[in-house]
Every structure is written in structure tokens, then in C-alpha cells.
Amino acid sequence: MKVSFAATRPEGSYALAIPVWSEDQIADRLSGFDQAARELAVRAADAQRFEREAASIAESFINEGDRARRLLIAGLGGTRDDDALFEKVGGALTAKLLCSGETKLVIDLSGLNFDGNAAARFAFGAAARGWRYDIYRTKLGEKAKPTLQEIVVVGGDEGADGAWANRAALLEGISFTRELVTEPANVIYPASFVERARAALEPLGVEIEVLDEKQMADLGMFSLLGVSLGSAQPPRLLVMRWNGAGDANKRPVAFVGKGVTFDTGGISIKPAQGMEAMKWDMGGAGAVAGAMKALATRKAKANVVGICGLVENMPDGKAQRPGDIVKSMSGQTIEVINTDAEGRLVLADALTYVQRTYKPEVVIDLATLTGAMIISLGYEFAGMFTNDDNLAVQLADAGMKTGDKLWRLPMGEGYNKIMDSQIADMRNSAGREGGSITAACFLGRFIEEGTKWAHLDIAGTVWAEKPGNLWDKGATGFGVALLDRFIAANHEG
Ligand code: BES
Ligand code: MN
Ligand code: ZN
């Protein structure tokens, strides 16, 4: 999507969007049109029961010279308490126009006293909602093809180009994550994930390091490697480093992603129904790779290291069995009760590796870790578990501001001891009760003294069965805006 900013409305053909705080504003906001056209627009909105609800749209046509211009009156909701409102309205406009035949959208903010930052936020929402991945559709009908190609935001142009540069970088990151998450598991497996990340990130100055099976075995990462035993695809540990702080010795922030490129459950195999969804069990790793792309594209002034534990969880004669005991890189032993509780086994070694190698100031892991997360929070909020109250506030705030919303859940000794094993230091699975919390406690056993850590269980937010404000059905890109915002607000300057 081409995006630009201007002081006045352009010439030529386009659909015109007019955001309004109230119904009474419509006539005023159409001041460039003649009286009859304005009155008709007000009546058309009224006839559609337009009551300026946030991101609601009344669609009509308005005469302008000899042109019948498509007009979208967009509600701003009357109050200003939604931090992600402008993005949402931009997204709603694209949702209406994407396959409408219109090629250009002009969002006219003149008279609303919005600055360039606000303008960039409208543009961001509109562009983000336009993302599609049609490479596998060879028979898309003419009317199902996207037509919208260009967005111009008018009347908030002061400082808009600078604000947009950051938003465009974020969009690059989100689009990369969506692509990785959308691709099927015969296309994205550990080695191909690494190659896509390399191609996307190395040109931006991100240093890539990759550990193969042998190197991981030498480090003692048998918790991660155990998950991979049943797969014909060899595992990888991907390390992406962005050193933008100026001081190379400044301790980095670490992002760690669960990258199970397909999760059959292994020998504890999942039911067939819905198993195809487990192609996006690498959504945490996808978010980490996308965040690295956003940060490097906008040259963030922070040191950040992204780690992805990449494996495929398959049943096979070589696969690990329920009851097997593995030794993790930390030295702690794990009884594998359920081979489908594999994400925590992968993250355990990735967490140890990142702490020992990079001494990060903060570690944030993202994982589609538990189905129980969807039972507790549904698809609206992701779960947050952390050992640091200040980090909880920073992340929750970044969540509300970006729309990647987080809700904190408890941890503690009572939950943690549930993960004790009869025969080893811990077990990887226990009862269903509090399943997301006990999973977080398991991960907590791999966090070293003094490391500030948060675990984000994004099982409910990586993939959407229904279109949202900023995405169509499918991959949401959840976590990229969150991590980008978290770095900008707390670790730059
Ligand atoms: N990847 C799944 C969790 C998941 C399920 C994510 C559905 C998104 C949608 C994870 O590896 C898993 O299988 N977890 C088990 C853990 C259990 C065996 C302790 C689960 O949630 O059932
Ligand atoms: Mn699983
Ligand atoms: Zn999984």
C-alpha cells in the first residue's frame, strides 16, 4: 500500500473518508461541497443509523463537479479513551474498500486539529488491514481481488512523514510475522524459517547466528532436542542481534520465541479435528522475527537479541515417549509426561542459552503455549506472567497503546510445586487446572536469579477466525507492535 500525506485534497478519482466525532459534524466537515450535496450526505448517514460509534462507517456517494465520489463517513466514537482508536478507524475504512473497485483512499482530517502522529496512525491502521497473502490462490475471481493501492491522509501533514517512517517500519515487521505464520508447515520448517529470517534481516544490519543439532547437543540442550527426535526436519536455534544502542556492551533486551513449526502433539498425538491450526505454533518465533525486522528497519537505539527455538513435533519410531527423562542445558532433569507439552521443553533450553550467552537485562518470551490460555482469556487478551511488577506495568501499557492487549495472571509456589516429578527435577505436564499458570511456572524454573522475565502466552491471539480491526481472518501479527512499543518506551534514550 502506497501511503502519503498532504495539506489539501488531491485531484482525480478516489474514495473520500471523513472521520467525525459526532453526527452534527458531518455537514461542517464537508465544507468543500455544495449545500445540496452536504444535506444529502447527512441524510444518507442518518438513514443508515450512523451514530458515530467508533469505527462505524456510513457509505454514500456525493456529487463533486461531474463526479459521483464514494463517501465514507467514519465514526470516532465521541470519547477519546481508546488508545488505538485512529488505527481502528483506518482499518475499518480499508476493510470496506479493499476489494470495492476503488484504488485510492483519501482520509481527510482537516478541521479536526490532528497532528502528523495521528495522521500516521490512521494510515497505519488502513495499511495494516490491507495485508493479504494470495500467493496460493490461482483462481481468485476478479471481484475478489484487492483493488485498493494507495492511501493519502489530508490535513494532519505536519510531522506526518517522520511519524510514518516509524509506522512503516512496524508494518514491515508485522507483515513479515504474518507471512511466517500464514505459510504452511511444508514451507516453513526450522531450516526454511532461518533462511527467510536471514534474507529479511541481514540486509538491515541484523547479525544472524544459527545453531544446528550438533552444536545444540554439545551445549546439552536435550530438552529442546528431545522434541525434535520424531521429525525428519532438523532443529535450529536462531539468534538475531540488533545492536542499535551505540554502546555494544550495554546489556540487551532478549526476546525468545516458541517456534514449533508444526505441533502434532508427538506420541501424545492430537485429535485430527483442527490440527491444521498447529502450523501457527511458531507464532511466538514469528513475532520475535517480525519485531527484529521492525526495530532494525527504524534503526531503534537499543540492543536487542531475538532467539527462536525452531523444531517440528512429530510422532515417529524415533520420537520421544511419554515417561522419557531428558536433561536440559540448565542441568535440571525433566520427566516428559506428555509429548504435546513440547513448547515449554523448547523454551527451557532457549531461555538458558540466552541468559548464559547474552546476560540480558530483561527476557520476554512469546509462545502459543497452552490451549488453557484460550479457555481463560479467549481471543482478546494474551496472558502475561512475570517476576517483576514494573515490567508488568510497562508491558501492559505497551499492550493497551498498540491493541496487543495483555492481562497478568498469577504465579507462585503453590502452582510451581505442581510441576514437581516423582523421578526427575520436574515434569512437563500436570492436571488441566490452571494449565497456563503451571506452564509459566515450569518456564520460571529456567530463569536465573536476578533476570527480569515475562512470559506471554499468545495461544489465543496469533490467529483469528474472524476479521479484526487491523487484520483479515488469519494471522494477526500479534506481539510485533507490542515489542516495538515496549522497546521505544523503555529502552531507547
Ligand atoms: N501448541 C499447543 C497449545 C495450543 C493449543 C496453542 C491450541 C494454540 C491453540 C501446545 O503445545 C500444547 O499442545 N499444549 C497442551 C499442553 C498440555 C498437554 C499440558 C495443551 O494446551 O493442551
Ligand atoms: Mn503441543
Ligand atoms: Zn505446541
Image (cartoon, rainbow, N blue to C red):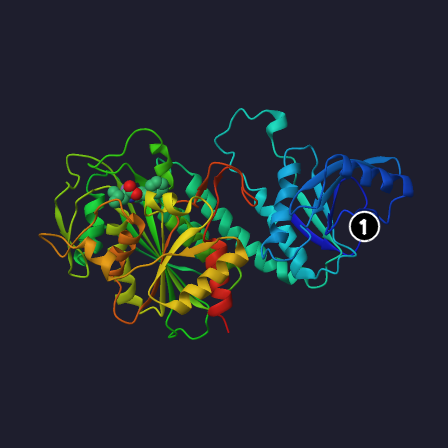
**Count of marks, rendered view:** 1
* Residue 39, image quadrant: top right
Closer-to-camera residue (82/163): 82
Closer-to-camera residue (46/445): 46
Residue of label 1: 29
Count residues near mark 1 (Cα–Cα under 10 Å), then give few for <14, some for 14-19, many for 20+.
some
Residue 235 to residue 451: above or below: above
Q: Is mark 1 within 8 Å of ligand 1?
A: no
Task: Give how far across and how far down residue 45 sits, in percent.
Answer: 76, 39
Task: Give how far across and how far down residue 321 sits, in percent.
Answer: 14, 40
- Quadrant containing ligand 1 reads top left
Three-letter residue code for mark 1: Arg
Closer-to-camera residue (338/70): 338
Residue name at image x 43 percent, y 55 percent: 407
* Residue 74, image quadrant: top right
Residue 295 seen in this snapshot:
no
Task: Give how far across and how far down residue 144 sits, in percent.
Answer: 60, 28
Q: Which element is circle 1 on? A: helix
Residue 470 to residue 113: above or below: above
